[in-house]
Amino acid sequence: MALFKLTLKELQEKFTCGEVTAAEIVRAYLLRISHVEPKIKAYITVNPKEALLERAHAIDDGLKAWRKTEPLMAMPLAIKDNICTEGLRTTCGSRMLEQFIPPYDATVMKRLNAQQPLILGKTNLDEFAMGSSTEHSAFGPSRNPWNQKHIPGGSSGGSAAAVAADECVAALGSDTGGSIRQPAACCGVVGLKPTYGRVSRYGLVAFASSLDQIGPITKTVTDAAIMLNAIVGHDPLDSTSTNRDVPDFTKSTKKKDIKKLIVGVPREYFAEGLDPEVEEKVQDAIQVLEGIGGKIQEVTLPSTARAIATYYLIATAEASSNLARYDGVKFGFRAKESQELAEMYHRTRSQGFGPEVKRRIMLGTYALSAGYYEAFYGKAQMVRTMIQRDFDAVFQDVDLLVSPVMPTPAFQLGERLEDPLQMYLSDIYTIPASLAGLPAISIPCGLSSKGLPIGLQLMGRPFEETIVLRAAYAYEQATDWRRKRPVIRS
């Protein structure tokens, strides 16, 4: 089997036992990227071949002396382009940061680099992670490896497409309202959003600080657990980072049943607007969960209908504040030929930001403006508390929740660009878990009649990634969906 077709765990085992070298891994993946990247466009920046081979040879030479490997040593990874990488361009998919090279690594990068992986490059995303289709990137859209006329999801669409197209063995994404889980569902891979505070946000370029969270996108649940092990833990540089004991998440991927676990099915997630094919595949998955020992119980989350409006007030308000720093003064893009400071601000932000980012800045600025703060942002925070309490009440009776990830399979490129509301509704099932800060995972559960992947979402109590991973692994082992791969014709 070609190296690029292997899972992270399989490739790790081959490298550890000496069947393959780091240099061979680099060559195999760079060749794969050269073949499929012109069609998929998953990357914004690919690390130069010479730099990658130099690092690979250093790993191979060092291995002879150390005779010790780390779980991610020599593993070819891709990083979403809103995570700071020292010396490697970080654009956030925006002209505003087109030439920005961070002088430091994000905490997750420091933790990854301690294990000596091979960072293949930085993946495409909706500008500043604001979008659900990766069509809002200033560098053009990425494409779904299953059908290149369709979106790969967003905002971590480049990361999900790279994993699905075998252009990396695993990737990091970020999730604010579904930006890991939704593209994972679109591309037929695994996407895990950890509990808010479980993974450091230091060095993640901020969109909405009370919602953003970094997580892995992988080919299997076991691979997600391996990646999660590498990036979790308390970070004093992030005031929202939690100081909790960190388990070995790979131990959750041993059992093939979920006996004694009660699985809640929220009534509100199966209402009007859900595509019949998606509902059918998710209901089939629920039956599988029951067949491997789960006790299925219908539950209700009454505040779900308010989640979209709540999210788009809180997220846009925080975005308008976070993006105020991009004014052309200290770093990033600066408009030329401005005679006065106010004119320079106006030109810089008008030319540097794309239309979706401008839309969200304006929405957020309005929500925070004098006379409207309490009516909009303040009220939204109250409703957010109601949504959290709904989850708290339900988790008194169940161990995890199951739902669709998206109301439809991946839609066609351009289909919703002129209809922002329909685009926002793509995240209707992922936003509530983000507002509540819960761990949630997307795993493949079927294909539509057009051959597009459909995702299953599992949500757990705060900091109970172990239960979410256990259930996801048991379902994955009980089905064959993990073995389905897209065919990209040359």
Image (cartoon, rainbow, N blue to C red):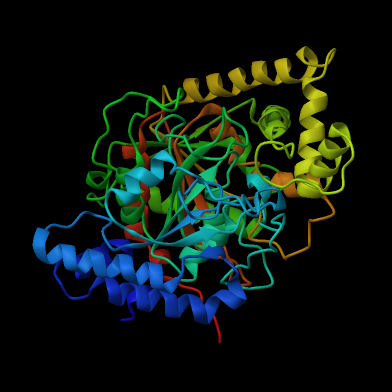
Q: Position of residue 19 (x, y in %)?
A: 18, 75
Q: Quadrant of residue 311?
A: top right
Residue 473, above or below 385: below
User: In the image, what residue occupies the spot 62% across and 37% down?
Assistant: 207
Q: Quadrant of residue 222?
A: bottom left
Residue 414, above or below 406: below
User: In the image, what residue occupies the spot 62% across and 60% down?
Assistant: 277
Residue 253, above or below 238: below
Count the numbered circles shown: 0
Q: Position of residue 134 (x, y in %)?
A: 66, 57
Q: Is residue 81 left or right of residue 21?
A: right
Could one spot residue 354 in this view of the protein?
A: no
Residue sitting nearer the eye, 204 or 316: 204
Residue sitting nearer the eye, 265 or 92: 92
User: In the image, what residue occupies the spot 54% across and 19% down?
Assistant: 389
Q: Quadrant of the C terminus?
A: bottom right
Q: Position of residue 323 (x, y in %)?
A: 69, 35
User: In the image, what residue occupies the spot 69% across and 72% down?
Assistant: 149
Residue sitting nearer the eye, 301 or 374: 374
Q: Position of residue 40 (x, y in %)?
A: 59, 72
Could one spot residue 285 in this view of the protein?
A: yes
Residue 233, above or below 27: above
Q: Quadrant of the N terminus?
A: bottom left
Q: Is residue 78 left or right of residue 244?
A: right
Q: Is residue 425 left or right of residue 236?
A: right
Q: Residue furthest bottom?
A: 490
